[in-house]
Amino acid sequence: MNKRALGDRGGTLVFTISAALLSSCLLLLFFSESFFDSFLLFFINPLTNRYYLGNMIAFMAPLIVAGLGIAFAFESHNFNLGGEGQLYSGSLAAVLVAIAMKGKPAALIWLFSFAAAAAAGGLIGALSGFLKRRLAVDELISSFLVSSIVVLLVDFLVTGPFQDPFSNFQATRAIPPAAVLPKILPPSSLSTGIFVALLVLLVGKFVLERTRFGFELRLCGANKDFARYAGIDEGVYALVPMFLSGALHGIAGALMIFGSYGRLLRGFSSGVGWSAIAVALIARNKPLALVPAAAFYAYLDSGAKSVMIGAGASPEIVGIIQAVIFLFITAARLPFLKPPALLAAHRRGGKAGDRGAP
Amino acid sequence: KIGVFIPGQREGSPIYDSLAAGAERFASENPGSSVRVFEAGFNQAEWQEKLTSFVGSNRFDVILTSNPSLPDLIEAIAPFFPSQKFICLDGYKTGISALHTVLYNQTEQGYIAGYLAGLISSSALPGANPQKKAGMIIGQHYPVMDTLIAPGFEQGLKAVDPSFGLDIRVLGNWYDATKASDLAKSMIASGVDVILPICGSASQGVVKATKDLNRYLVFFDSDEYARAPGTILGCVALKQKELAYAKLAEFAQKATPWGRADVVGVKEGFIELLDRHPSYAQNLPQSIRGRMSDLIAGIASGALSFPAPRL
Amino acid sequence: MRSVELVGIDKYFPSSGTWALIQARLSLNPGEIHAVVGENGAGKTTLMKILAGLERPDSGQIRIRGRTVEFKNPAEATRFGIGMVHQHFMTIPGLNAAENILFGAEPRTVFGLLDKKAVLRKAADCAAGYGFSLDVRRNAESLSVGERQQVEILRLLQKNCDILILDEPTSVLTDQEIRSFFSVLRQLKASGKTIVIISHKVGEIKKIADRLSVMKDGRFLGEYKATDISNHALSDLIMGEYESPRLKAKAFPPRPAPTILEIKNLSLHKFKRKAHALRDINLSVGGGEILGICALANNGLSELEDLLAGRLKPDEGGVFFQGRPYPKLRKAPWLDGGIAYVPSDRIGRGSCSDRSVAENIVALDRGSFFPHGLLDSAKAQARTLKAIQVLGVKARPESKISQLSGGNIQKMILGRELSEPPAKLCLLCEPGWGLDYASLRRTYKRILEIRSRGSAVVLISSDIDEIMELSDRIAVLHKGGLTGLVTNGPGITKSKLGALMMGLENVYSGSRGTAGRDHE
Amino acid sequence: MTWLDTLGGITASALEAMTPLLLAATGGLFTELAGMLNIALEGLMLAGAFFGFAAAAVSGSLLLGILAGALASSLIAWIYGSATLRLKANVFITGLAANIFAPSVTAVLSAAWFGTRSVVALAVPEPARPLQTSLGRIPVLGGVFFSQHSLVYLSWALAAGAAVIIYRSVLGTRIRATGARAEAVAAAGFKPDFYKLSAIIISGFFCGIAGASLSLPLGAYVPNMSSGRGWIALVAIYLGNRRPGRTALACFVFALAESFSNYAQGQFGIPSEFILAIPFAATLIALSLGTSAKNE
Ligand SMILES: Nc1ncnc2c1ncn2[C@@H]1O[C@H](COP(=O)(O)OP(=O)(O)OP(=O)(O)O)[C@@H](O)[C@H]1O
Ligand SMILES: Nc1ncnc2c1ncn2[C@@H]1O[C@H](COP(=O)(O)OP(=O)(O)OP(=O)(O)O)[C@@H](O)[C@H]1O
Ligand SMILES: [Mg+2]
Ligand SMILES: [Mg+2]
C-alpha cells in the first residue's frame, strides 16, 4: 500500500465527515429552539464536560472489542448478525461466575469471569459457524436467529432463576464490589476497562495481521477457492472466526458489566451488537481504525444524550441527525467532490455490491 | 425549580404524563417555580447514566420521578450530589435522607380490577360467556407485575367465584399492537371474555380485537374509556397527577418527610375506580355497580385491606 | 476512411505506478481482421478497454469513422458499434444462453413481459445463422469455455456491433474449436465487420489477420501487413532479439523411475445415478516423465483436473500417490511442496486478486514462511523476488494481483509452483495460457528441467501443440473415457490426436489395472 | 371446540399474520436478487404503516391509504438507495440509517399532524372481508381461507405479480443479472446501479404496502409497530432460497409458528420467553433441514 492511496482515502473521509456534520448542523438549526445552545451541547459538550467525556470513552470499550469481533468475522467472510445475543449471554456468564467466586481475589475473578464470557459468547457464535460448516446454513441468518433465541433465554434467566430478589430492577444480583473495575473520572462510568479493551485490540491486531492463523483467516475471506487450493481448511475458518467473534462480543459485554453496570440488567446491551457492526464497517475492518471509529460513534451517542438532556431536544430530531450522519459516514464519494482518479480506478476493479460489508 | 425525570416516554404512558402534568399544574399555580421534564426512554440500563446527567446538568430544587426501581438509582448517585432532593412516586425505600417515596398499593388496584372483571365475566351481558375465565395481556414480566398486580387481579377474580381462572399472556415488547391483537383473539377463542391489557401502546391491538369480537376490557392507571366506550367497562386509575401535585405542595411548605416511605391507595384517595363515565354507568347493570361500590366503600373504610408486600 | 483511429493514447495506473500506454496508437480499416500483438504487459488489453469505453485514457484521441468521440462507459461505445469479448468472460449466471445472447435487446410480448419463446427462437436463429452449434436453452453456468465465447460473440453481433474486439479469444479453445472459430471470423469479415484480435500465437495470427499492430512497453512499434512479415521477423519484433532456449531432445526416459501417480479404475458420476463424467480411467505416471492429457471441451478434462486437485472424490476406483491413497488437500505432500498444481482457472483458484503478489506466494507455503506461527517477512520478500524473476513477472512484490496483466498473473503462478526444489508431482493445467512467446519458451524449458530432475508431470491442456511439444506419453479422453494412451513420437500427428479426441478412433488397449507406462 | 377448529383457527390467524411478512419479503427479494443486503425493510415498513394510515384517515379511502403508504415508503427507499449507490456508501450502514430515520420522521410528523408522538387511533375504513359470505361458508376451509380481509388477498396477488416480474419481465431479468454479475451488466452497456436502485425502490413499494397492512386493519398507528417483522422477512428470503414461492412458504412457516405460540401461551405452563422463542427456533430448524436436504 503506498502512502498516496491512504492519503486520498483519508481525504475522502474528512470530506464525508464534514458533510455529515454540516447537514446535522442544518437540521439542528431548523429544529431546535436555540441553535447555538444545541450546537454546543451536541458537538462540544461531550468533549469538554468530564462526565460526558468519561461516559463517551467508557462506551468506546465495548464498541472496540465487539467491533474487533465483527472484524474477525467479516475478514473471514462470515457475517455475524448475532452480536446482541453473544454479548448478552457472555455478560450473564461473567456475572454468574463473578457472583459464585465472591470473596476470591479480584484478579482471579476477572480471569475466570472474562474467560466465561468469552466461552459463552464464543459458543453461541460457533453454533452458527457449525451450522454453516455442517449444513451449509447461511451464517448471516442463523446468527441472527440464534441471537434472537438467546436474548429471550437470557431474559428468562435474568428475570427468573437469577433475578435479584431484593431489586426492583429486572436484574441479577450485583457482582462482588471488589471485582468492579477501578473507576476513572467518577461519577462517569469510565473505568480501567478501556485499557483492557485496547489491550484486546492490540492482541487482535497482532493475531489478524502477523500470525499464520490471521493470514489464513483473511485468505479464506478474500477468496475461498484459492484458500482451499492452498490447503486451508475452510470449515475451520467458518467455525473459529465465528467463535472468536462471539467470544469478543462476550468480553465486550463483560467489560460493560465490570466497568459500568456491576450487574446484569435486562436488556442492558440492546443495540450494542448492532453498533459494533457499524463501527467495524466504518473502520473497514482495520483493527487500529476501530479506535477512531468507536470514538466517533460514541461521540455521536454522547452528543445526542447531551443535547436531549441539556436542551430538551426530542429524541426524534436526534434520531434524524444520526440517520443523516450514517448516510454519509461510509460514503466513498460525494456528488460535489470528484473522486480522485485513483480511487475511481481502484473501485472499478473491486467487486461491486455483494453483501456490502466484508 | 422542579425537574421531572421520566424513565420512559411521556406520550403513550398516562402514568408518566400525569406525573409531568401534576408538576406543570403546580408550577403554573405557583409563580416563580419552573418545570423541566426529561424523558429517559425505556431502556432501564441507561437510566442511571441519564439521571446522573440530568441531576448534574441543571440546578433543581427537587427532582420528581416515578418508578419502583428509581430509589435504588437515587441511592447510588445521591452521594455525588449531596444537596439534591428527590421525590419518587410508585417506589418504596426508607432511610435515605434525600429521598421521599410514595408507593401505590397496586395489589389493591389489581384486586378491584379483578373483582370487576369477575363480575362482568359471570354476568348476563351480551359479550359475556358462562366460562369462568379472564385474561391479562402484559408487555413483559416485571417484579411489580408478578408480585402485586397479577396476584391482586387473581384474588379479585377468585373473590367473585373461586373457580375463576386467569390466563396471562406475554407480548414480549410494548408496541407490537398487531401481535397483541392476535393474542387477544387467541385468548377470546379459548373462552376469555374480559381482558386487562397492561402492554403499553400495543394495548391498541387488544382494544381493536375485543371490540371486533364483542368482548370486554378493564383498564388500568388512567381514564381510557374514550378509546372504546361500551367495550371498556371499567378503569381503575392511579391519581398520579393529584399525588404529584400534593407532594410538590408539601415540598413547597418544607413538610416533606425525608427518608420516609408511604403507601397510598383507595383510602388515601389516590387509587380510584372511575365510575362516573357513561361507559361504566350505562353499560353495567345495577347489580354489578352496586357490588363494586360496596367493595370500594369496604376498602376505603379499612374493612378490607391488602398489605402491599414491600418492594 | 478508417473505421477506428486511436492516436496518442496515454494511460497511467497510479495504483501500480505503471504507464500502461505511452502515445499508443491503432488504426483499423473497415472490414479487416486486425491483430494486436506484444509481450505480456505490453498494454494490449488496456488499449482495447479504452476503445470499448471501459477505461478512460489520460490523454489522446479516439476517432470513429472520422468523428472524435469520448466514451464515458461501455454503453456509449456500444452506440458506436463497438463491442468487446473479454479475456475473462462476462456471461451472466442464472440466465440461460439465449437470455445472455439477447441481454439488453429482449423481444417482448404485448404486456411488456419477456417473450421467452421468441428469446429462444431468436437466439437459436442467430446462432445458426453464424454456424454455431450452440444449445441456447442451456444455463450459462453449464457452458464450456468455447460455448461461453460463442455466447459473448453472438451477444455483440446481435447488438449490431460492427467493430468487434476479441481479447485472446483462442487461448482456451481446442484446435477444432479454433478452426471453426476462425471460419466464423472470416464469415464476419465478409459481412463487413471490423475485427480486432489479441493473440500470442504467431502462427495463428498470420493465418487469420490481414494486418497487425505490434506493441511493446505501452508503445506502438509498428503496423504491418500479415503477408509482408515472416513468422520469424514478427517474433523478433515482439520479443526483441530473443534467443529461444534450446529444448532438450524429447526422449522417453530410458529407465523409468518408480511410479509416482497412479489412477486405477476410476469413475466419476456427473450427478448421482446419472451420466458418467469419467469412466474407468487407468493411468500412471512415473518420475521423470511428462504425461499429457487432452480432450475436447466437456469430455471430462475439467473433472479429471478437479479429481487430481483434491476437489472431487472418485465414485469408483482410486488415485494413488507414491503407492498410497491420494492425500487430502490439507495433508503433507500438498503443504510441503510435494505436489505442485497450476490450476486452469488462474483468477478464481490460482490467485487471490485483491492480495499482493507476495501474499499470493506466501499463501502456498505457509509452513516455511510462518516458522513459529509468525510471518518471516524477510524470507517472504526474498522468495517473492526470486519467483518473480524466474519468469520475469512485470510486477513488484507488493502489487495487487488485480493490477497485473493476464499473462503476468499466469507467470506469477508458474513461478510459484515451479520453483526450487521441484515438487515430486506437478499437475499443470493450461500452463501456457496467455503467455507471450518468450515466457512460453522459458516455461517449457523449466518444465523439461523439472522432468529431468525426476519429477512426474501431468500436463492437462487444450492446446495440442503444447501437448505434443512437451509430453512423453499422451492420453486422450473422449466422453469421459480413454480413447488413446500413446507414446509421443514422430508417428503422433495432430490429425491423429484429433480423431481420438472426437472419438472417431479408439486405440486404447489397456485393460483394467494393466494399462500404464509399459503398455507399448 | 374440536381440534380441527383449533387448527383452523391457528391457520387462519397465521394467514393473516403472514400478510405483512409476505409483502416485505417479496419486496426484499428484489434487493436480494440485485445483490444487496437490505436491512432497511424494517424502517420502510414503519414508514408505510404511518403514511398509509395517515392518508387513509385523511382521505377516508382504504385504497388511497395503501397507495400513499407505498409511495411514501418508495420515496424513503429512493433516498436510501441514492445514498448507497451514488455516494458508494455501505449498504448496511445506510440501511441502519433508514431504520433510524423512519421512526424519527414519523414521530415528528405524527406530532405535527395528529398532535401526538404516541398511538394514533382514528376512524379509517376497515378492509372488507369480500368472500366471507360466499365461499367463507364452506366448513373449516371457508373459515381458514375465505374469511380473510382484502389485504390478505391483495398480498397474495402482489406476491404472484412479483414472481412474474422477477422471472418474466425485462426489468426482473436485468435485476437478477445485476445481482449475479454486475460487471457483466456494465460490460453489456447497462448501468448496474440503475437496476439496484430500481430494486430498492420496488422493495420500498412493497414494504410500504406491508406497513399499511399492519396499521389499516388495526385502525391505528402505533410507533414501532413493525417490531422486527422486517428482519423476519429477510430471514424468510434466505429460508426461501431467494425464490418467490419458497419465500412465501417460509413466511407462512414463521407466521404459523407465531400463531401457534400465541395459542400455546394459554395452554401450557411454559415460561413465556420460551414460547416467544418458538418462531425463531422453528425457522432455524426449517433452515437447517432445508439446506441439508438441498445438499443431499
Ligand atoms: N487496473 C490496473 N491497475 C494497475 N495497473 C494495471 C491495471 N491494469 C493493467 N495494469 C498494468 O498495465 C500494464 C499493461 O497491462 P495490460 O493488461 O494492458 O497488458 P496486456 O498487454 O494485455 O498483457 P497480457 O498479454 O499479459 O494480457 C501492466 O503492467 C499492468 O500491470
Ligand atoms: N479413495 C480415494 N481415492 C483417491 N482420492 C481420494 C480417495 N478418497 C479421498 N480422496 C481424496 O481426498 C480428498 C479429500 O477427501 P475428503 O472429501 O474426505 O476430505 P474433506 O471432507 O474435505 O476433509 P475432512 O474429512 O478432513 O473434513 C478428495 O477430494 C480426494 O481427492
Ligand atoms: Mg365468562
Ligand atoms: Mg491482456
Image (cartoon, helix red, strand yellow):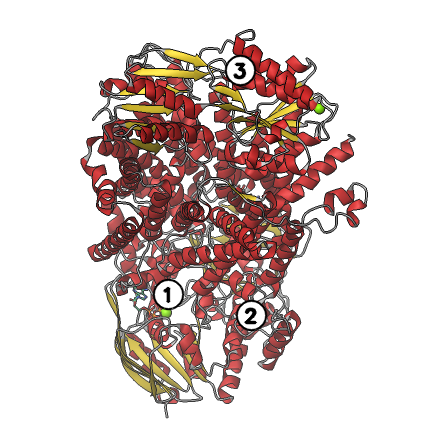
Q: Which residue is mark 2?
A: C497
Where A240 sits versus C202, above or below?
above
Secondary structure beneath label 3 = helix
Q: Is mark 3 within 8 Å of ligand 3?
A: no
Rendered location of residue C390, percent (x, y)? 29, 59
Rendered location of residue D34, percent (x, y)? 49, 58
Residue at mark 2 shares a chain with residue at mark 3:
no
Query: How many angstroms separate mark 2 from mark 3 (CA)?
Result: 99 Å
Rendered location of residue C62, percent (x, y)? 32, 82
Where D124 sits versus B66, above or below?
below
Residue closer to the observer: B19 or B195: B19
Amino acid, disc 1: Gly
Which residue in the rendered view is the most extreme toward the top? B303
Residue closer to the observer: C504 or B256: B256
Specify the quadrant that holds the N terminus of chain B: top left
Q: Which residue is mark 1?
A: C406
| Residue C492 appears left or right of A251 | right
